[in-house]
Image (cartoon, rainbow, N blue to C red):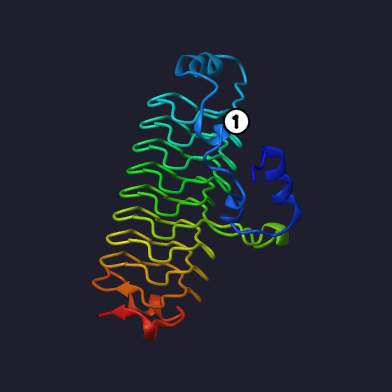
Amino acid sequence: MRLTSAAILLSLIGAPISAQSIMAGVDLTSPAMTEATMTRDEVIAALAAPHADLSGARLNGLDLSGVNFKGVNLRLARLNGADLTGALLDGANLDQAWLLKARMDGASLRGASLFQAQLIGASLKSADFTDARAAGNFNKADLTGAIFVGADLGAELGNQSMGLMRGDLTGANARGADFTGARLVRTVLSFATLTDTDFSGADLSTANLAGADLTGARLTGADLTEADVTSARLSALVETDPAVLRPALNLKRAFHD
């Protein structure tokens, strides 16, 4: 079964769903998900126009490295397998965009919106998500050294229809990433590699950290109220007051010093 963008949008409006349910029933081998209808030069030409709008554009597999998409509307765009290395996406709208296995190392997404963006398996090494709304699907993504300072990956708790929409980093590699002051309420970080990651001042309340590896992480001033740390590795934490861990759930079932 194939879903059009309109059908996907209707499914979003119809009922509370998780960040992954958008994947259900989508034919990832279809031309809409694998082919491009523009060239790199055509994209750059379109961006030169006032109020450039690439919402819903099919840009799969294109080399868009270093391209300036600052403030551009890319909502529902298809960028699967695209090369956005070093691209400038500050303030861009990437809500519900498809970026499966995209290459975005060193890209700047400061203040961008990635609500329910699909970044499964994407390479985002050293990407900058400072102050971004990043409640997207980062399953198995490479976030080594990524910057999420002040970013919001948490659930929209005040909106029941969107109550399950939250950042999902299941199985992601976020070694050495910076989540200082980030909002991670109800975010899924299960089985993620979070070694040497900085969560100073981050709100991890009710987050799912089951099976995550936080060896050498910094949790100074973090809020772990009811965060699930079942089978998480909490060894060699840096300058972290033991009291920070006390509000967490299943602390006795975690591996820690």
The residue located at (53%, 50%) in the rendering is: 136
The amino acid type found where label 1 is placed reads: Asn
- As drawn, which residue projects farthest toward the front? 1
Q: Is residue 119 above or below residue 90?
A: below
How far from the left and from the top, in percent, is residue 89? 47, 32
How far from the left and from the top, in percent, is residue 256? 29, 79
The residue located at (65%, 62%) in the rendering is: 157
Direction from residue 163 to residue 110 in the image, left or right = left
SS of the residue at dot 1?
loop
Q: Locate residue 179: give its quadrant.
A: bottom left
Pick the quarter of the image with the C terminus: bottom left
Direction from residue 122 to residue 35 in the image, left or right = right
Number of residue marks:
1
Q: Is residue 248 above or below residue 1?
A: below
Q: Nearest the camera: 110 or 171? A: 171
Q: Is residue 140 above or below residue 192?
A: above
The residue located at (56%, 42%) in the rendering is: 113
The residue beneath circle 1 is 73
How far from the left and from the top, in percent, is residue 141? 39, 50
How far from the left and from the top, in percent, is residue 177? 34, 53
The residue located at (48%, 18%) in the rendering is: 39
Direction from residue 63 to residue 186 in the image, left or right = right
Q: Nearest the camera: 181 or 40? A: 40
Question: Within 10 angstroms of label 1, few (less than 14), some, or many (20 or more) residues?
Answer: many
Q: Locate residue 171: give its quadrant.
A: bottom left
Q: Nearest the camera: 159 or 46? A: 46
